[in-house]
Image (spheres, rainbow, N blue to C red):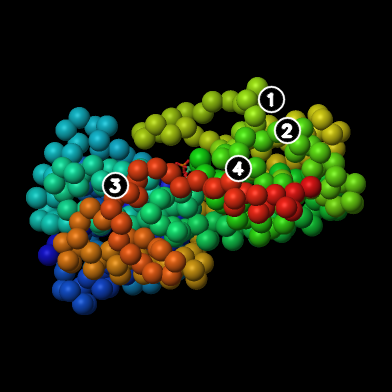
């Protein structure tokens, strides 16, 4: 069987580990052939492929990014996009597709499956916001990068008696902020799931200064104040209709300075959280996802996404995986709140 592989959406560490596992097991255990589609859904849409054999996946396990490239191309929004993909799969002799992506890429995978394409999904995203799986690969690496940054911010904040704000990614979910903030001993963590009260944030900042420590505020890029408290700017939309986030850290710094009279500065970690080598945890998770994905494709178990449940890798329906975002529950945020102030 010829199987196509693509990686879509924002890249993350561990994508290459999945590709390697799929190809290594697919060739050596099942005798399948592979075709790499370039740049997410743009590859099958435009018929742009690259060779994907054992040689092509040698040495890529520790490498960040994706050897296949990625994009946020949305074929559903393009006139005749689905038919073009079907035609290109037929022309390249590809019987099944393994799509490695987050909510957008897997949302497209689900719609293609509904229209007769053989697809298996693999959940990736630093945001950890996909339902149906306990964790996505990429998340652990992003959290560790953010935690290290927070550790470093602590020491310089103490020297200068400043409030330092660390803005992290995560889109509409606060998982990176919650985990990195907990691991890094943040003074307060602000997440999109719970609009923050700026008066309360300033109280935390002042109480931390009173104890002669400098506050570190971890803010998720999608966090926002209680309605009407502070003015925010609207960002551009991408092909999936998502607003480009970022900038809340700076707004917060200005507001903290104005209200407390203390110096406040912001560090935006941005794409640093998505770059570089994956942690051991992400390499193992991504590898196990890849092994399970090729098993599913080999068995013809399409319309599924591989997922982590506890310590087991299982398969769930793409519909279940993409139905709604997995956001931070109130109970998890309450655990972190014990350490605020
Ligand atoms: O979904 C992963 C992610 O890194 C989000 O955390 C972030 O909002 C978004 O992608 C940024 O996307 P881009 O790299 O296209 O600006």
Whole-angstrom CA distance, mark 2 to mark 4, is: 13 Å
**Residue at the spot x=10%, y=56% of the render?**
93
Which numbered tag is attached to residue 198?
Answer: 2
Whole-angstrom CA distance, mark 2 to mark 3, is: 38 Å
Residue on which disc 3 sits: 319
- The spot of residue 8 in percent (x, y) is 34, 48
Local secondary structure at mark 2? helix
For mark 1, does the 10 Å Cα neighbourhood hold few (<14), some (14 to 19), or many (20 or more) residues? few
For mark 3, does the 10 Å Cα neighbourhood hold few (<14), some (14 to 19), or many (20 or more) residues? some
Q: Left or right of 167: which side holds 15? A: left
Residue on which disc 1 sits: 229
**Residue at the spot x=12%, y=53% of the render?**
92
Q: How many marks?
A: 4
Whole-angstrom CA distance, mark 3 to mark 1, is: 38 Å
Whole-angstrom CA distance, mark 2 to mark 1, is: 7 Å
The mark that comes first in sequence, 2 or 1, is: 2
């Amino acid at each position: 069987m010829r199987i196509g592989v693509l990686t879509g959406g924002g890249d993350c560490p561990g994508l290459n580990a999945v590709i390697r596992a799929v190809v290594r097991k697919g060739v050596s255990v099942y005798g399948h052939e592979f075709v790499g589609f370039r740049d997410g859904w743009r590859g099958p849409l435009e018929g742009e492929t690259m060779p994907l054999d054992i040689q092509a996946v040698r040495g890529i396990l520790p490498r960040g990014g994706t050897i296949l490239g990625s994009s946020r191309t949305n074929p559903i929004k393009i006139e005749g996009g689905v038919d073009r993909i079907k035609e290109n799969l037929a022309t390249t002799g590809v019987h099944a597709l393994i799509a490695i992506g987050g909510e957008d890429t897997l949302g497209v995978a689900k719609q293609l499956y509904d229209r007769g394409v053989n697809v298996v999904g693999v959940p990736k995203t630093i945001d950890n916001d996909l339902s149906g799986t306990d964790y996505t690969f990429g998340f652990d690496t992003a959290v560790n990068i953010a935690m290290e940054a927070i550790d470093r911010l602590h020491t310089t904040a103490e020297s200068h008696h400043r409030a330092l704000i660390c803005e992290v990614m995560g889109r509409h979910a606060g998982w990176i902020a919650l985990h990195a903030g907990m691991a890094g001993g943040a003074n307060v963590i602000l997440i999109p799931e719970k609009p923050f009260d700026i008066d309360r944030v300033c109280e935390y900042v002042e109480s931390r200064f009173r104890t002669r420590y400098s506050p570190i505020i971890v803010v998720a890029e999608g966090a926002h104040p209680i309605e009407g408290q502070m003015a925010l700017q609207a960002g551009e939309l991408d092909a999936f209709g998502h607003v480009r986030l970022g900038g809340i850290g700076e707004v917060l710094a200005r507001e903290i300075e104005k209200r407390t009279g203390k110096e406040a500065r912001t560090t935006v970690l941005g794409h640093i959280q998505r770059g570089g080598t994956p942690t051991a945890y992400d390499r193992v998770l991504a590898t196990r996802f890849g092994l399970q994905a090729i098993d599913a494709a080999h068995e013809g178990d399409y319309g599924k996404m591989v997922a982590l449940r506890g310590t087991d890798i299982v398969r769930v329906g793409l519909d279940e995986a993409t139905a709604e975002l997995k956001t931070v529950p109130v109970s998890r945020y309450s655990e972190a709140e014990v350490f605020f102030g």
